[in-house]
Amino acid sequence: MLLHMVGRKNAAGLVGAGVNAAAQFLLVVVVTRTLDTAAAGTFFTITAAMVMLAGVLRLDAGNGLIYFRARTTRVPKFRDMEVRGQPATASPSRPLLWVALAPVVLGSVAAGAGLASGSAMILPAALVLPFVVVADVLVSATRGRGSMRPTLLLDGLLQPIGQLVLVTVAVLAGAPFPVILLAWALPAIPVTLLAARQLARRPYGSVTWPEFWRYTAPRSVAAAIQAVFQRLDIVLVALLAGPAQAAIYTAATRFRVVGQLVSQGLAQAVQPRLVRAMADGDPAEAWRAYRRATRTLIVLTWPLWVGYAAFAPWILQLFGPGYPQAADIALVLSITMLVATGCGLVDVVLIAAGRTTTSLVNTAAAVGTTVLLDLLLVPGLGALGAALGWSGGVLVKNLLPLAQITRSYAPRVAA
């Protein structure tokens, strides 16, 4: 029944998202159960900062690859057409993967080298940073042909399970903190190599530098802001209220990963379809795909959020003593995610339509809202203040694009 509702590709994305969410949740349980609150908070803060940095360095090249590969699959002479209303340039075409990856690889190597020369605590993980960055881009590239299998195996299974196993072994063996961080980062290496091998089997087309980065550049900024938005709250709690509050906040909000990964799994499967529909001048089909994905998202996630709100005091006991006090954070999280998932994949629709600048403005507004509320609320309320700040940002990030796509596409579909 579920397979019929979401389709095979959507189901593959959801399976990967489910495994990823479970592995991340168990990883938090392992860390909070084996390390003291301050050490756990430090681990969560450093890994959150590295995820933010990786999100910035990726330049959203993965989504650019999906966009151009999906369109060139449908329209073989796309490179001679207009991109977002701009005429194609006379620049020579280059291999699509090379155009996308060159700035990402150079930036991540430079950032890794810079971090490696800093604190000894993060030295081992900093050396692996380029793999953490490139792995996501390469896995995204495999979806450009419409296949979800590599994403399921690499991003949905190998990386999260590898992190869980290696970190568990490290903490149980009493490894020093830098080794625990390295254990978290290491699975990105095999993911990178296996994704590269998958892509090497078939040519991936070509594009000019201006064409690719004219579309991707605004989205690169938006993706960087989005990466900061997803993890900034943990870092701000640590800075404003201390690592112990960061640990409590991370544990209480870990269930939001469920909603994020289910949305991500659906988006990975739906995005190429949306791009092709927009390229064909068929907003009605794009709107129908969005509506189907939204209904699926509601069916899959709303029972989880209602259950988490009701049973949070007991669920939070899994993380150890002291964590059940964060039940109020769980309630804020649940109510916010009910609204957010009810809006559906609104940002994905904007990106598929080529409206990357609009997406950038929306994301910047959401981050600004979160930072402002955090600065006002965290010093007095600690982790709860961060939850309220994050909630404000999430509502802005979902309600703004919902209004925009409804105004732009719903009337045209009805007509």
Image (cartoon, rainbow, N blue to C red):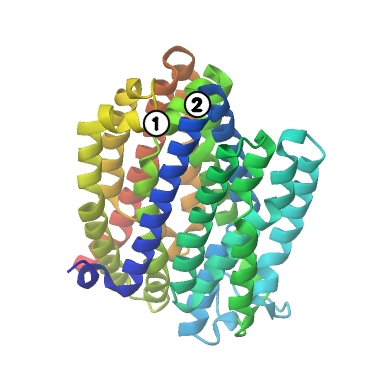
- The residue positioned 35% from the left and 23% from the top of the image is 326
Q: Amino acid at mark 1?
A: Phe
Task: Answer left or right for 52 relative to 379.
Answer: right
Residue at the spot x=52%, y=24% of the render? Answer: 36
Above or below: residue 271 compared with residue 22: below
Q: Secondary structure at mark 1?
A: helix
Q: Nearer the viewer, residue 233 or 187?
A: 187
Residue 107 % position (x, y): 74, 54
Give the residue at the far right of this rendering.
Answer: 117
Q: Is the Cβ of the residue at disc 2 closer than 8 Å to that at disc 1?
A: no
Foreground tag (2 vs 1): 1
Q: Give the image quarter of residue 137.
A: bottom right
Q: Which mark is residue 39?
A: none
Res 246 label: 2
Q: Residues within 10 Å of mark 2 (few under 14, many from 20)?
A: many
Q: Residue furthest left?
A: 1
Quadrant where the C terminus lies? Answer: bottom left
Q: Position of residue 75 (x, y in %)?
A: 49, 85
Residue at 41% from the left image edge and 15% from the top image edge: 381
- On screen, residue 33 above or below 59: above
Which residue corresponds to the image point at 70% horizontal and 72% vertical from the top-left?
A: 98
Tell me if residue 306 can be seen.
Answer: yes
Q: Is residue 331 above or below residue 364?
A: above
Of label 2 and label 1, which has the lower sequence position? 2
> As shown in the figure, which amino acid type bears the numbered disc 2?
Ala
* The N terminus: image quadrant: bottom left
Query: Can the viewer see residue 85 in this picture?
Result: no
Q: Name above or below for residue 162 compared with residue 152.
A: above
Q: Where residue 331 sits in the image (x, y, percent)? A: 27, 29
